[in-house]
Amino acid sequence: MNFAFILDPLAKLDAGHDSSVAIMEAAQQAGHQLWVTQVEQLSARDGQVWAQLQPVTVIPVTLGDGHWLAADPWYEVGTGGWQSLAAMDVVFMRKDPPVTINYIYATQLLDLLTPTKTLVINHPRSLQAANEKLYALNFPSVIPQTIVTQDKTTILEFVEAQGAAVLKPLDGKGGEGILFLEPGDRNLNSLLEISTHWGNEWVMVQQYLPAAKDGDKRIILLDGEPIGAVNRIPTGREFRGNMAVGGRVAAVPITDRDREICATVAPRLRADRLYFVGLDVIGGYLTEVNVTSPTGIREIDRLSQVSLGEQIVAWVAAKLKG
């Protein structure tokens, strides 16, 4: 089968960390043809979406001294050209956030594909609709106390009532722009003015969960089912556990509470055709639903001696058959 990946430039990917590369390796090992392209290389013509597709061969990582070791370079790209994406069996939309207007336009082009002929992961219209912060609001029974607002006074009242809170930009990624808020901070008013662009942009504010010091769990869901998890633990004076800001990772089980959260969100995820998703869970509460390019596969594979990429590729093959 033909597996196409819409990615950031290959040279910018970390083969020992990036989930996209793990899936590519598994697809190649299963005998499938890999193709790569970028958002900027999509076009529409004659009612079809086209892409400048290049064939790629990846050199699998190896495990050494507790880390994934990648060749340099870890990929070989062949000569490509314009092809209709309708010729692909599956298209992985794995462009990293932020979700810009060009990202939205790209998903609208991908919406020209016939779902019964070409599987798009995740579904284009759902990528348009499912903001990774706001989507969690659909599951009020399993999220912490949360507000979304542009209003500084509303945030100040919330922080005062909660004792401490965490502010998140709605378009952030990898922990960028997340702030810890507490009533006694002399900079609090200024922080809120800057974060909301003086009351012109929405932010999400959630109650601070003290369990965050013990880690922010990433749970990978495949078609609504949890297939692996990793804990991301803050280091030093940093309160964020995101790997992008230096959080260390540790093996962690999927608990009964985690499965309850997954069962709560799964029907909506399946209805929205959000097949490959990363849930963020702190202290038994769902905090985010990552749908654009969820990461964590490499860390879960290394710590738990599994291959989530193989599971994903096998699921794709089974779904395409029928």
Image: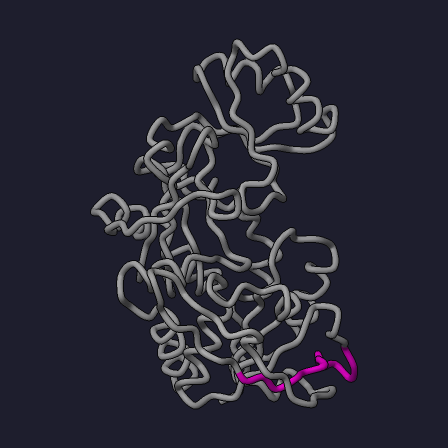
Residue in the foreground of this view, choosing between 147 and 103: 103
In this view, 14 is above or below 130: below
In-image side of 35 versus 246 (left or right): right
Occupied quadrant, residue 315? bottom left
> Who's the residue at 54% across and 66% down the image?
123
The answer to whether residue 206 shows anywhere in this view is yes
Q: Residue at x 61, y 16 (%)?
A: 188
Q: Is residue 117 visible?
A: no
Q: Quadrant of residue 34?
A: bottom right
Front in this rendered view, residue 41 or 237: 237
Q: Is residue 284 above or below residue 151?
A: below
Task: Please say whether residue 51 is one of the residues in the magenta stretch.
Answer: yes
Q: Residue furthest right?
A: 45
Count of all numbered marks drawn on residues in the image = 0
Image coordinates for residue 144, horizontal then vertical, percent: 40, 31
Of residues 187 and 235, which is closer to you in this image? 235
- Quadrant where the C terminus sits is bottom left
Q: Main secondary structure of the magenta part?
A: strand
Q: Is residue 95 magenta?
A: no
Percent coordinates x, y for residue 240 in the rendering: 47, 36
Q: Position of residue 13 (x, y in %)?
A: 58, 65
Q: How is the image coloured?
A: one colour
Task: Name the residue at 27% across, 66% down.
Answer: 305
In this picture, which residue range is highlighted in magenta? 44-57
Q: Residue at x 63, y 64 (%)?
A: 12
Q: Position of residue 221 (x, y in %)?
A: 37, 59
Would residue 276 be found to the left or right of residue 204 on screen? left
